[in-house]
Amino acid sequence: MTDLSPQLLLYIVTAGGLFGIGLYGFIVGPQTLRRILALNIIGAGIFMLMVVLAYRGLADDASLPSTDPVLHALILTGLVVAVSATAFALALLARLNQAKAAQCSQDQLRHKQGPGQ
Amino acid sequence: MSLLLFDTILCLLLLALALASILSRQLAHAVILYIAFGLMMALAWARLAAPDLALAEAAIGAGLTGALCFSALAHQQIQLKPDVLSWPQRLWPAVFVLLMLGGVLAALLQLPPTASQLIAVTQAGLGNSGVSHPVTAVLLNFRSWDTLLELVVLLLALLGARQVAPEVKPATSWSLSLSWSRLLAPMVILLAGYLLWAGASQPGGAFQAGALLAAGAVVLRLNQQLSWLSWSNFWIRLLTVSGVLVFVLTALTAILLTPGNTDVVWLRWPPQLAAGIILLVELFATIAIALTLTVLVAGEPASTGAELGCGEGV
Amino acid sequence: MDCAGQLSVLSTVLSSLLLITGLFFFIAGSVGMLRFPDSFSRLHAVTKADSLGLGSIVAGLMFYGDLWQNLLLLLIWLLVLASGSVSCQLLARFAKAQQDRVQQDKT
């Protein structure tokens, strides 16, 4: 069915598994912070798949000098972009929590004043 | 054979950590498990012959993302009763994900085991690129557009986060962690400088050095050091944009310096100057990445006297 | 394992013994972290046993490296030792503060 070496097969299945786990967490996860973590896990799965693609064909062919550097450079860029996107998402989340807390206390205040009026 | 066993254990551990991080009841456990997952990922990169990624992941995935998530956790209100999902709410996404996973794996297993063509192309151009490490050559010569735009993305994320993020409460410091972080600081700077310099011929370069410097600076910031490192400081703002600025200016200069402007390519360095240009661009990119990530992760400390939280006044 | 062929029998045995001792301490520390009842004894188990385990693994690996690599290994051990102790103290302080708060709430 496939000509890939067992090591590559293992890492491909792991990459797919990480993608699936992240996707499940992203759909199910009740809290926003957990969804952000799940998105990062999806990213890790995709990066791992790209590394496997870069590594492909290397194990049995010793004449090649290195793994595919273009994919490695892309993933390196992707890692930094992922952390900055995570930071932005967490900043939005913190703002959301602050707004929710303010809303809550306002509602409580209105609730207290309500019967008196 | 023994290495295959190691790979199997590593992969199982990765899957288990990811699953536990998604399914754990408490959010704090999820964050801690995610940090452990990041460390294991760094090990997996090393096993897959990607030392550049292992260096970056150890600093970013395990260090900076962990600090980010913990500071987000501190903002989170404590939920008294956790949301409990019903069985259909758990089952249908699982069925959907499994179907999708089956499709993805069926497609992936058809991959031909031949090596990529790009290796030969990169190797052919390496002589004129000014560096001898192929990843650095791709990042800063062959595909410098990506790197330039990536620096712009970092800057945009910083500007966006500064717009929306509430002020953080100043952390309390403790003398032992303070003196340990002070002891670490020169080592971090030394290591980052080495990584930057070694990037020309070995794994390393601007991204890894910048991430490492940022991790060191965040530890110092958490111990209430480096108070000058804030967005209100003019020089910090200037250095943060300097990565993009130096990149663009160097590209313009390179076009002007190229003799016989017949086939001018934007962001392509003349071969005899390439080594110096790449080092210059990388130096400022390192500083910009380090400062951007530090300000993103550590946030702006609340100015004294203006500590009125939104929900506290009422 | 190309390097192992160049070692004498004595150093191979010594190095393996050190590695196995290191693994034993790691496992003991992990079991302690999982089984001990409260935060302080867990921290105690994991930091002490892991520092010792890492130390003997580093000592076992030193048979394989040259002088420069051995110095780097030693530096890694010292760094992990110091940062482990500092983070152990930090966690213990945090746990103590939480415990005090819980006791204050009770009274």
Image: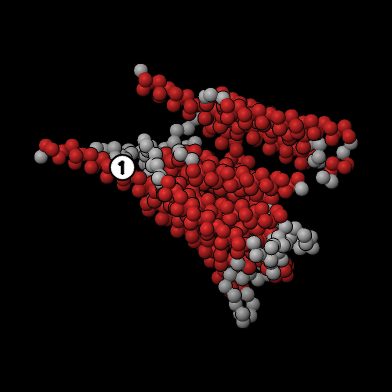
Q: Which residue is mark 1?
A: A101
Q: Image point 57% across, 52% down: which residue?
A: A17
Q: Nearer the viewer, residue B269 or B70?
A: B70
User: Neighbour class for label 1 at 10 Å: few (<14), some, many (≥20)?
Assistant: some
Q: Is residue A106 left or right of residue B77?
A: left
Specify whether residue B236 is in view.
no
At label 1, the amino acid type is: Ala
Q: Image point 49% across, 61% down: which residue?
A: B152
Residue positioned most to the top:
C107
Q: Quarter-wise, where is residue C65 in the image?
A: top right
Residue B223 % position (x, y): 49, 36
Q: Nearer the viewer, residue C91 or B107?
A: B107
Specify whether residue B186 is in view.
yes
* Disc 1, SS: helix
Q: Image point 56% across, 67% down: which residue?
A: B145
Q: Quarter-wise, where is residue A76 in the image?
A: bottom right
In the depicted structure, whether residue A93 falls above or below residue B279: above
Q: Is residue A28 left or right of residue A41?
A: left
In the depicted structure, whether residue B41 falls above or below residue C101: below
In the depicted structure, whether residue C21 falls above or below residue B145: above
Residue B34 % position (x, y): 53, 44
Callout 1: residue from which chain?
Answer: A
Residue positioned most to the left:
A117
Q: Image point 84% across, 35% down: which residue?
A: C12
For the C terminus of chain B, which image quadrant?
top left
